[in-house]
Amino acid sequence: MARRPVNPFRLHLFLLLALMVSGVAAASSGRTAVLSDLRINEQVAGDVVVFGADLELGPEARVEGDAVVIGGDIRVAEGAVVTRHVVAVLGGAEVPVDADIGGRVLCFSSPATLLSASSAREPSLHADFSMRLLAAGGWLLVTTGLAFLFPIRMRYGAWAVPSLGIKIPALGMMAGLTVFASLIASLGLGPVLGVPLVGGLMVIFFVARAVGLTVLGCWIGAMVLKRWVRHPLPISLEVFVGVLVLLAVRFLPMVGETMWTLISLVALGASIAVLGVSTDLMRAEPSSANQ
Amino acid sequence: MIRGEAPVATDCQTIQEILTENGGGLERLDGAESQHLEVCPDCREVAAAERALGLLFARAIPPADRVVEERVLAALRPARIRRRIVAFLPVAASLLVALVGAVMVGGVPGSGILGLLPEFSTQGWMAFATSVSDWGAAVATGARAAANTLDPAFLAGAGLVSIFGLVGVAVTALRWRRVSLWRDDR
């Protein structure tokens, strides 16, 4: 009798659900939650850690350690006490002046907005604009550079996007969940191993996202330019136009960052489509005649 | 397959693929496939077209005159260089945008240029370096807190999910590697 192969998507989802349940229930000291919001309004003897959800500290809360949220927001009520640091990575922090924080408040909505986070104490339109221009230029440079160096691989990926359809965001979601689980596993190893591992993970995530954005940019750019220009254009120009469109979505007020997160997940899936390019096709890459 | 025709054991698509692979030759066709070819004008047309294409290639390649070939390639060289330059223009434009951003953040040394920029720019990279340091401190704090708080079984579960995810992604990439874009049976 033929055995039916296990669907990797379902297995991955099952394991993630098991992780969520055990994450809420099996905290040994302090408090922790994964993908579910946590509200605390009592004394906690230890650290509070939340992954992929929000943390709310009520006025009676007293955390004897760090309060850390990764991939969510942290809200501290007036009168709440945290004896060490309040940290929000890939999320925001609302900390009133009356809150008693023993350490520092460190808040980063994304690695790309490091400077904005730093200048948040003195809001500056100029700083914000400069940083956005630098980030946009950086993404454009990386993606058009990839298209210039690997035109055939990127073109193949762009061709694969419409034919693969919904598979690409589904795979991107799976890759995103894998990165998220890897982040938890890396951080759990402690600062000595955890910090370099998280750094490495961020680099891999960035590279995969850059490749995926190049593919998506090529696909969108080709669609946009096809309306005005009939003859074939260089792939780098298509990527330039397509990534400009994606960056314009990113810098939309209110919904921009959420849209960018979704675009990043789709880009992860698209980067895997590029990895799937046949090796026969790759032998033609050095000629780069099909610019 | 022709409409109204009695069902044939073979399929037009399969036969046409065999014909395409063999340049219109009938040697690889078995009995049923050869019979199908006799009653199917579409397949016969494909066979004839493939044979005609094969003849065309046989006459066109290799080029008779090496000198002509070299002259054609030499004439194409400036066009290829021009195409490479045009392809590089968007990269150069991207570099320009990034440089303008860097200048506005404060990345260009030289008081003459920095003097023209608003006050924030002169401190831009210093603030950026502080932020990077803070980012490291935030990750270290998160790692310390996670190591203190999370159960080892939970961490093992997270590791397992990571491994399964990586395997799933690798399996998918390898599966797609074998799939041709022009086939719609994926």
Image (spheres, rainbow, N blue to C red):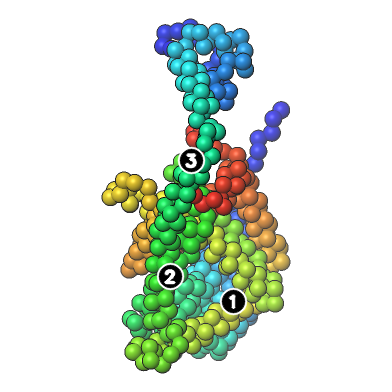
Q: Position of residue B73 (x, y in %)?
A: 48, 46
Q: Earlier in the sequence, mark 1 or mark 2?
A: 2
The residue that appears at 67% across and 77% down in the rendered structure is: A191
- To which quarter of the image does residue A247 belong? bottom left
The residue that appears at 60% across and 39% down in the rendered structure is: B178
For mark 3, what is the residue? B68
Say few, some or many: other residues with alpha carbon within 10 Å of mark 2 (under 14 / 14 to 19 / 20 or more): many
- To which quarter of the image does residue B18 belong? top right
Q: Position of residue A201 (x, y in %)?
A: 61, 66
The residue that appears at 47% across and 45% down in the rendered structure is: B71
Element type at mark 2: helix
Label drawn at residue B139: 1
Residue A165 can be seen, yes or no: no
Callout 3 amino acid: Val
Say few, some or many: other residues with alpha carbon within 10 Å of mark 3 (under 14 / 14 to 19 / 20 or more): few
Callout 2 amino acid: Leu
Callout 1 amino acid: Val
Q: Chain of mark 1?
A: B
Q: CA distance from mark 3 to mark 2?
A: 41 Å
For mark 2, what is the residue? B95
Labels 1 and 2 within one chain: yes
